[in-house]
Amino acid sequence: MPDPRLQNLYDQIGAEKIEELVNAFYPKVYADPDLSPLFQGDMNEIMRKQRMFLTQFLGGPALYSQEFGPPAMRQRHHPFEITPRRAECWLRCMKEAFEEVGLDSYPVGEFFYNRLKQVAAIMINSPDQK
């Protein structure tokens, strides 16, 4: 049974705020020396996929699945070396983006961010390099 707090997140946050979050987040990711090697290619396409994923993740329309099939994010990210350090950097960029767009002050902001922390943790597939 889905967590009832997730059922209304999309409605509480909205498409416009998701757009703002993605727009604030990706420049930070591309500027981060630990993360930028993972994000090669068209930033606009990566951002489009993230908007679709977050819409679905928050309980909105299943845009990502309609175009790409089930998210299966761990499997989709398996070809990339995601270390604990990179997961921390990704979360730092996301936290900064949350603050930049004001999502940290939304009643559901902390819950949303904590869900993203869980996603980051399951993405780790490689140890940090010494």
Image: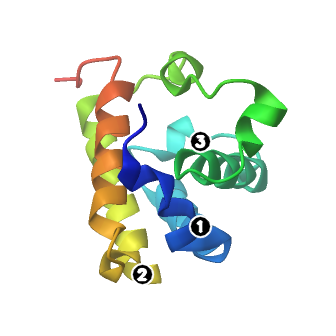
Q: Residues within 10 Å of mark 3 (few under 14, many from 20)?
A: few
- Rendered location of residue 83, percent (x, y): 31, 28
Q: Residues within 10 Å of mark 1 (few under 14, many from 20)?
A: many
What SS does tag 1 mark?
helix
In the displayed structure, 19 sits above or below 6; it is below
- Rendered location of residue 96, percent (x, y): 35, 70
Q: Which residue is mark 2?
A: 100
Q: The C terminus is located in which quarter?
A: top left
Instruction: Compare residues 59 and 39 and report the one nearer the observer.
Output: 59
At x 78%, y 29%, the residue is 68
At x 52%, y 71%, the residue is 13
In the displayed structure, 69 sits above or below 43; it is above
Number of marks drawn: 3
Q: Residues within 10 Å of mark 2 (few under 14, many from 20)?
A: some
Q: CA distance from mark 2 to mark 1?
A: 12 Å
**Which mark lies nearer to you, 2 or 1?**
1
Q: The N terminus is located in which quarter?
A: top left
**Which mark lies nearer to you, 3 or 2?**
2
Choose the circle earlier in sequence order: 3 or 1.
1
Tell me, for residue 18, which label it has, or none: 1
Choose the circle earlier in sequence order: 3 or 2.
3
Marks 2,1: beta carbons within 8 A: no
Marks 3,1: beta carbons within 8 A: no
Q: Which residue is mark 3?
A: 39
Q: CA distance from mark 3 to mark 1?
A: 20 Å
Q: Specify the amino acid type for callout 1.
A: Ile
Choose the circle earlier in sequence order: 2 or 1.
1
What SS does tag 2 mark?
helix
At x 49%, y 61%, the residue is 8
Is residue 130 shown left or right of residue 116?
Answer: left
Is residue 112 shown left or right of residue 129?
Answer: right
Is residue 76 shown left or right of residue 49?
Answer: left
